Amino acid sequence: MDKTAIIELIRVAFSQVPRPHSPFPLGYDGDLEAADLFRSAADWQAMDPAVLDTNYDALGFMSEGGFRFFMPAYLIADLNQQLDSADPSFHLGVLFDDVIEVPVGDKVFENRIGPSQLFGPRGGYGAMTVGDYVRYRNSVFTREEAAAIVAYLEYRRDLPDAVDGDAIDAVLESFWRDRAENAPTSDALTEHLRAEREYLEALGVPVPEGDS
């Protein structure tokens, strides 16, 4: 697929994704100015690519709802070569497994980076690896959204100056192709939300405004 077709595929696939009704779509207490920029954004298609690029690490701090809602803005900006610092492919699991040696004084320490690196055992994540965490985060996307992401990744992989082709192929085979074939569809998600709302209303439980 050419770039124009992929951009249209992304726009269609993500057109019905609701903006998180939570007031904290970024879900973190770091850069409050950056959080406000995304919190006040009602439409991901209206996001300024310069804002996305300046906040190149924002996807890593968003709640799952914010991650799903704003991802297409980063994908399209990247396809249009409007990003210098931000790299959405990193958040989609395009990671390089490597061991780096860090000299400290008279010793050399080995640090593992990439999907096999432990995510944060001291923070309570136990044996979860970075790859495990990335798969968890990206399970938020429906089948149609995953298919659009596959098209984006294949385009990135096939660029003449691509240096991450092997890493893209690895994550396509280990996660994204299966997700694009077997994840719940957008219709299934909509029907689940409809049935859940009907059930809660029958019980007399208030349904949050904006929940559908």
Image (cartoon, rainbow, N blue to C red):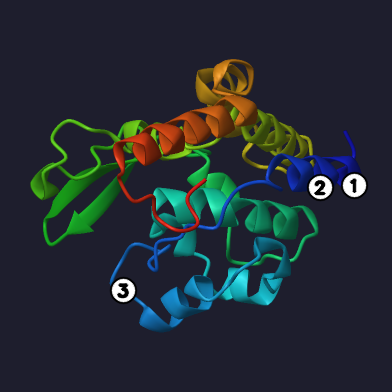
SS at mark 2? helix
Compared with 102, 12 (above or below) is above
Q: Amino acid at mark 2?
A: Ile
Residue at image location 28% in from the left, 34% down from the top: 129
Q: Amino acid at mark 3?
A: Gly
Say left or right for 86 vs 101.
Answer: right
Confirm or deny contact between disc 2 and disc 3 (CB under 8 A): no
As measured in the structure, the alpha-carbon distance from the residue carrying label 2 to the one carrying label 3 is 31 Å
Say left or right for 74 vs 179.
Answer: right
As measured in the structure, the alpha-carbon distance from the residue carrying label 3 to the one carrying label 1 is 36 Å
Residue at image location 42% in from the left, 56% down from the top: 60
The answer to which quarter of the image holds residue 76 is bottom right
Q: Amino acid at mark 1?
A: Thr
Report the residue marked by disc 3.
30
Q: Check disc 1: other Cα within 10 Å, few if <14, some if 14-19, many if 20+.
A: few
The answer to which quarter of the image holds residue 154 is top right
SS at mark 1? helix
Confirm or deny contact between disc 2 and disc 1 (CB under 8 A): yes
23, 129: nearer the viewer: 23
Query: Of the residues under marks 3 and 1, which one precedes in the sequence?
Result: 1
Can you say which quadrant of the picture contains the N terminus? top right
69, 74: nearer the viewer: 69
Q: Check disc 2: other Cα within 10 Å, few if <14, some if 14-19, many if 20+.
A: many
Report the residue marked by disc 2.
7
Report the residue marked by disc 1.
4
Q: Residue furthest bottom?
A: 33
20, 207: nearer the viewer: 207
